[in-house]
Amino acid sequence: MTGVEVSERTVEVAGVTIRYRAAGASGAQPVVLLHGGASRAATWDRLAAALVARGRRIVAADLRGHGGSSRTADYPLRGYRDDILGLLDALAIERAALVGHSLGGHVASLLAQDQPDRFTRLVLEEPPVPSRELSDRHGLSSARFLLPALGSFGTRRGYDRRAVVSAVRQLRVPDPSWWDRLPAVSAPALLVSGGPRSHVPPQRLAEVRDGRLVTIPVGHRVHSRAPERFRDAVVPFLTG
C-alpha cells in the first residue's frame, strides 16, 4: 500500500492459520477485504490505501489455501466464512463493512447472511451468485470465473489448486437455501459487475434484492483492470 503503513500478522482459527494485512488506526471503522480464488490479500492494496486515507481501518485476509494462510484437507465454502468470523473475533471487531471479489464475494454474502447485525455495508464484486434450481443454467456457467486463473499463476502467487477446484465444484451446485437466507441481510449492498466480458451473468446480480448494481465493463477482475473506476464507485459507498 503506497504511503500506508501495513502490518502482516496471523491468527489461529480452529486449527487454521489465517494471515492478514492490516492498516489504518485501530479505533477507526473497519473494512474487511476478501480476495477471489487464486489471489491473495495484497490484491486490495490500492483500494485499501484509498480507504485508509478516508479514515478507515483495513483488514485484508488471505483465505485458507491462499497466500500465507493454511493449506487444509478440504475447502468447504462455509469453512471460509467461519475462518473470517474467527479472525474478526480474534481482532475484537464487532461491526465492519465487507468487500469481496469473486469467491471472496460469495464468502462475504455468507457472512452477511449468518450475522447480519455485524456487517454495516456490503460490496460484492463479480460474486458467483448460485442458481435457485437445477434447471437454471446461469449459476453453473458463472462458476467458471475461476478456471482461467489456474496454471502457472498459482505457482507464482502461491495458492492450493485444490482450493480453486473445490470452489468451482461447490459453486456450480444450485443452492436455493442461499436465496432463502438472502432476506436476512440488512446491510446496504453494492454489486459490481464486469459487464459482458465477465463469466458472471449481470442478470443474476440484478436479482439480488435491495442491492445497487454498478457495471464497469472490463471483465471479471474489475478492481485490478479498472482500479480508479472501482475505487470511485466503492469508496464513497463505504464512507458516505
Image (cartoon, rainbow, N blue to C red):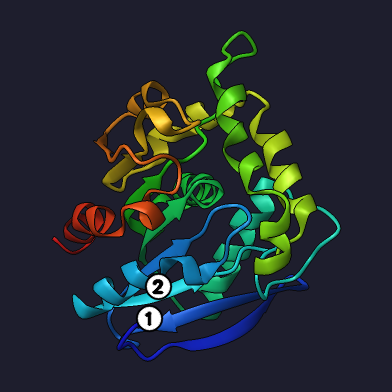
Q: Amino acid at mark 2?
A: Asp
Residue 227: x and y in percent read: 31, 59
Q: Residue at x 61, y 8 (%)?
A: 135
User: Can residue 4 be seen in this snapshot?
Assistant: yes
Label 2: which secondary element: helix
Q: Amino acid at mark 1?
A: Met
Q: Is residue 10 above or below residue 87?
A: below
Kindly identify which residue carries mark 1: 1
Residue count near mark 2 (Cα–Cα under 10 Å), binned few <14, some 14–19, many ≥20: some
Residue 68: x and y in percent read: 67, 76
- Pick out the residue farthest to the left: 240
Q: Residue at x 45, y 33 (%)?
A: 198
Q: Is residue 77 above or below residue 1?
A: above
Q: Is residue 106 above or below residue 72?
A: above
**Frontmost residue, 119 versus 166:** 166
Q: Residue at x 51, y 46 (%)?
A: 102
User: Can residue 117 be seen in this snapshot?
Assistant: no
Do tag 1 and tag 2 residues touch (Cβ < 8 Å)? yes
**Frontmost residue, 124 versus 232:** 232
Kindly identify which residue carries mark 2: 45
* Residue 83 horizontal side relative to residue 181, left or right: right
Residue 211: x and y in percent read: 28, 36
Q: Which quadrant is home to the N terminus? A: bottom left
Q: Residue at x 18, y 64 (%)?
A: 239
Residue count near mark 1 (Cα–Cα under 10 Å), binned few <14, some 14–19, many ≥20: some
Residue 50: x and y in percent read: 25, 72
Distance of mark 1 from mark 2, alpha carbons?
A: 5 Å
- Pick out the residue farthest to the front: 152
Label 1: which secondary element: loop
- Pick out the residue farthest to the top: 135
Q: Which quadrant is home to the C terminus? A: bottom left
